[in-house]
Image: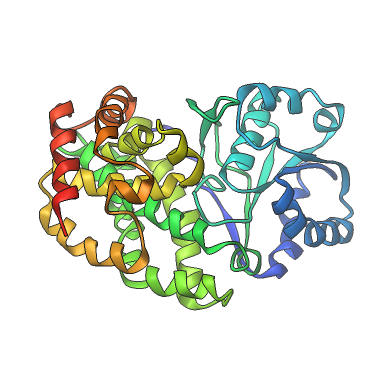
Amino acid sequence: MRSTHCLPSYSFGGHEVFSLISQFTKRYGATVAVIGGEKALAAALPHLESAFKAAGIKILDVILFGGECTFQRSKEISEMPSVKAADFLFAVGGGKAIDTVKLVAIELDDKPFFTVPTIAATCAATSEAVAVYTADHNFDDVAFVNHPPVHCFIDADILVNAPSRYLWAGMGDTIAKHYETLMSARNREQVYNTQLGLTLSSMCSEPILEHGLQAYKDNEAHRRSEDFDMMVMTVIFTTGIVSGCMPGDYNSNIAHAICYGCATNEKTEKHHLHGEMVAYGLLILFAVDKQLDELKRWLPVYKAIGWPTKLSQLDLDESHIPQVVEKAVSVRDIVISPYEITRDMLKDAIEYIESLS
């Protein structure tokens, strides 16, 4: 059992959440470096600037994170005088921007950092994990900060105006959290943290089954609703809590392994989102693990919301199956499984999913 476990905290609402900034930053100082993506900063910075001014916080710098979360870029940012001098950091954007700031915080001996997610595609804004890539967008490694962000400011007024495809993909990734953690933990001794994570993991799937389609429609219409707000919290916060409770290797399994396999095709990696590929990978998990009732339960939802159920929807065909499978069996994601995951299992499962109407 983990002897120390820091849970993430958040403020949720509309633009008014930024009026609370001083409550959470005052113990750290009064200077900030803001790091994020170009579009994210355009959406959030006007609100942050007003809030910082009201709180007496001086912005030392506003920095574009660079488009990819890499060790090299994070080191470059950490060496900037303004970033070194800042009392704390604000990470603004999606997963890659936020993860870059996590690496910067590690480089600067756990410098305090806060998060402002501008898309609801991942739990990066509340989790300790960092997905690191190479400059040419290939998966590199996973790193971990010692604790989640000090606080996460979730402005649903910004999120509802983001492209709906990010929430769409984020929900696909989130559903897999439930099934992958259950599969990884099966037949293993469960300590307190793991039991807590497994219990909460059902909140990564069942709310999406009930509210996901309507939330997606509301996001497309840029209309905040109870369904939309619930999905934002499910993707950003619930998944972050579960990720933090589970041992690192329990957090993913076949669905993510298949995702990385699909991403070996350049066109797929370029034109399809991580959560979209994970959602497809979950169908393969259902087939491998003989969870056919769950497959039957989710397929109508997939088709209604438009998540991929066929290789062709990911710019793949049957000729790509060997490379997808080869990559999938090479990654750590399937190491912690209740049985050995073989190439033949994955190949047969993909072909089975392809055969369904």
Q: Is 107 situated left or right of 138 in this image? A: right
The quadrant in which residue 110 appears is top right
- Image quarter where the N terminus lies is top left
Residue 357 image-quadrant placement: bottom left
**Residue at screen point 59% across, 68% down:** 160
Residue at the image point whose x is 71% and y is 68% from the top:
15
Residue positioned 59% across, 37% down in the render: 99
Instruction: Residue 188 in the image: state x and y as whole percent.
Output: 18, 33
Residue 103 appears in the picture as rendered: yes
- Relative image position of residue 328 (x, y in whole percent): 29, 29
In this rendering, the answer to whether 129 lies above or below 234 is above
Is residue 241 at all visible to an observer of this figure? Answer: no
Q: Is residue 209 depicted above or below 59 in this figure?
A: below
Task: Choose between 166 and 303: the one closer to the eye.
Answer: 303
Relative depth, front residue between 58 and 138: 138
Residue at (53%, 57%) from the top-left corner?
A: 120
